[in-house]
Every structure is written in C-alpha cells, then in structure tokens.
Image (cartoon, rainbow, N blue to C red):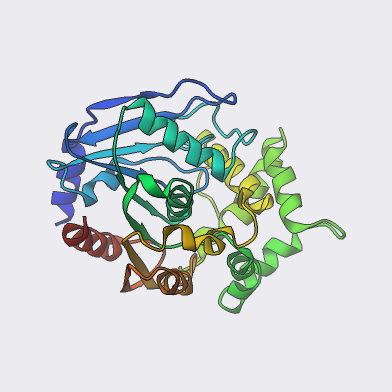
C-alpha cells in the first residue's frame, strides 16, 4: 500500500500551473491536476504559511475531477515568500475567487480543506455560498478564542513542561504572541530560530507520545512558514472573534462532509462536533486515530468522498 501511494504520487503531473496577476504586492502560485473537463474542486491547504501538495489531489478520482489548488499568500511558491503585509484570511478567499475567474470556471464548485484549510473553505463558502456545490473539511479549525485557549493554556494539561518553556522565554510585561511575532520578524537569525524552536515547534509537540521541542534544520522554507504562521496567530488569525461559527446560517443548506481524528490534539474533535451541530446537512465521521492528520484519516476521507462527491 505504501509503495502504491508513492507510485501514484510520482505519477500525477499538473496539466496547468502558473501565477495569478499580482495583487496587493503578492503573486499567487496555482496548480491544477486531473481532468480539465472534470468536476471542479478547489482545495485549501493548511497553515497558515503552508503550501499546496500533489498528495492532496490523491483523495480524488482524477479521471473525473479537475483539482485546483494554490499556495496562499506568503507560503510555498507564492511570492514574496513569508510576506504578511496584505495577507489575511479574507484576502485568501478573494484570491480563490480570482483564481476561479482566471481559469474561467463557471457554475458551482466543490470546496475542500483541512486544518487551516477547513477554516478558509468554510469562510469561502460563507462569502460565496451560491458558488458552492458541496463542502468537505477535515481536521477542523474554527479559529476562535476557544481554539487559542486550547493551544496556549488547556493543552498544558498534557504537555506542561513544553508550555512552561514557551512561556518562560517571554520577558516580564511582554505579551506572549507579540514577543514571538517580534522574534520571527527580526532580521537576526538567532531571534528567528528562537521563535521557531519554541513557539513554532509546539504544534509538532501536540499529539506526540514522545515529544521533542526542537527543529532539526532551520531552512528558508521553515522561516517563511513561521513568518506567516506566527504573524497570523499574533493577529487573531485576521478574523473577527468566532466569525466562522457566527456565520453558519449562510451555509446551512450546503451538504457538508466532516472528517476528524478522535485524538487530534492540535485541533480537538470538539471543533468538528460543534460544526456538525451547526450544519443540518452535514455528515460527521470521527476517525479512531491519534494525531493531526495521518494515513487513516486520509484513507477514510478518500473513501467518504467517493460516495459524497
């Protein structure tokens, strides 16, 4: 099975890729896989600061689907790398709409995303509900105060020594998120490394049974990711408080698939359950797995998509 995955991954090639016309100082990279005449699917990657991956397309029957994705502002191949200026969740939604217009996609599209991508998928649907055929989200992140409390406080029940280290680095009278944002925005490599090693690495600690707060190698890609990620977190994820749940009424009639690991300690399963309760036409599948993502979740997401899409 593992070998088959890699064979399929190396076998898929984009039939179209490029950059959207520059806007707000950003050039957004996009890529398409599958059937140019197939059902359009737009997929949002995780992060913030992440990038589109070919493996995301493997959840779909590429003979029937036109799979569209893009690297959100500041992430992946989009330029300038690591840029946070003019970079918000709503701008990401606008880029998605620009991309669909640029590709001359008409009619409704299937919208999908995981983790931060689920946040953007939901926000896109709430902004353009008439453009959305169906929704599929995994590892749900609602980007509200409760999510932030989980990361910065409640998760300390399971990882007290790590959260203590993160907080211990912050000077007296300094706010934690502002402190780490200042470090990652610094031009000094030592400051950036501290921001990545302490705050940036904590997401990898959550869900691990043998956690280590360390980064093997700090590359330009690592710095770019964390510049976007930490700045987003320090700026309340550029959303109004509880905005996603507040606006659920706008998408209550859209059929939605929700898939989430039972023991996801980055985005607790509560998020998926609350979302399911807010959407009358949703289906919730809870996967018996530990971690944020993982092979079993991907396999079940793909299986459920087969019947749902």
Residue 93 falls left or right of residue 307? right
Please determine whether, in this image, residue 165 is positioned above or below residue 187. below
Residue 137 falls left or right of residue 160? left
Q: Is residue 218 visible?
A: no
Name the spot of residue 283 as percent of width and height, x first. Answer: 30, 70
Q: Is residue 239 visible?
A: yes
Q: In the image shown, does 86 or 81 lie closer to the viewer?
A: 86
Q: How many marks?
A: 0
Q: Quadrant of the N terminus?
A: bottom left
Name the spot of residue 213 as percent of width and height, x first. Answer: 57, 60
Q: Name which residue lies at 35% across and 38% down.
A: 69
Name the spot of residue 88 as percent of width and height, x first. Answer: 59, 42
Residue 150 falls left or right of residue 71? right
Residue 244 falls left or right of residue 161? left
Q: Quadrant of the C terminus?
A: bottom left
Furthest-top residue in view? Answer: 21
Name the spot of residue 58 as percent of width and height, x first. Answer: 22, 47
């Amino acid at each position: 099975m593992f070998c088959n995955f890699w064979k399929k991954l190396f076998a898929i090639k984009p039939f179209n890729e490029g950059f959207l016309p520059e806007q707000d100082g950003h050039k957004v990279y996009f890529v398409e896989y599958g059937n140019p005449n197939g059902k359009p699917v737009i997929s949002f990657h995780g992060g913030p600061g992440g990038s589109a991956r070919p493996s995301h397309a493997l959840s779909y029957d590429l003979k029937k689907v036109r799979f569209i994705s893009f690297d959100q502002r500041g992430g992946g191949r989009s330029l300038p790398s690591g840029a946070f200026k003019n970079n918000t969740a709503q701008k990401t939604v606008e880029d998605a709409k620009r991309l669909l217009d640029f590709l001359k996609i008409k009619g409704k599209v299937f919208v999908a995303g995981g983790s931060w991508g689920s946040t953007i998928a939901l926000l896109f649907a709430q902004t353009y509900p008439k453009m959305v055929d169906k929704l599929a989200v995994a590892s749900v992140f609602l980007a509200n105060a409760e999510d932030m409390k989980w990361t910065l406080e409640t998760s300390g029940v399971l990882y007290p020594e790590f959260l203590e280290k993160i907080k211990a680095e912050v000077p007296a009278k300094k706010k934690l998120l502002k402190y780490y944002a200042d470090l990652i925005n610094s031009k000094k490599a030592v400051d950036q490394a501290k921001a990545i090693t302490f705050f940036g690495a904590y997401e990898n600690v959550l869900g691990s049974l043998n956690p280590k707060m360390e980064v093997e190698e700090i590359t330009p890609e690592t710095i770019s990711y964390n510049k976007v990620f930490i700045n987003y977190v320090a700026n309340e994820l550029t959303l109004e408080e509880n905005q996603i749940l507040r606006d659920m009424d706008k998408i209550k009639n859209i059929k939605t698939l929700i898939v989430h690991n039972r023991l996801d300690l980055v985005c607790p399963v509560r998020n998926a359950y609350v979302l399911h309760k807010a959407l009358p036409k949703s289906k919730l599948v809870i996967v018996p797995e530990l971690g944020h993502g993982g092979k079993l979740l991907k396999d079940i997401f793909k299986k459920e998509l087969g019947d749902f899409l």
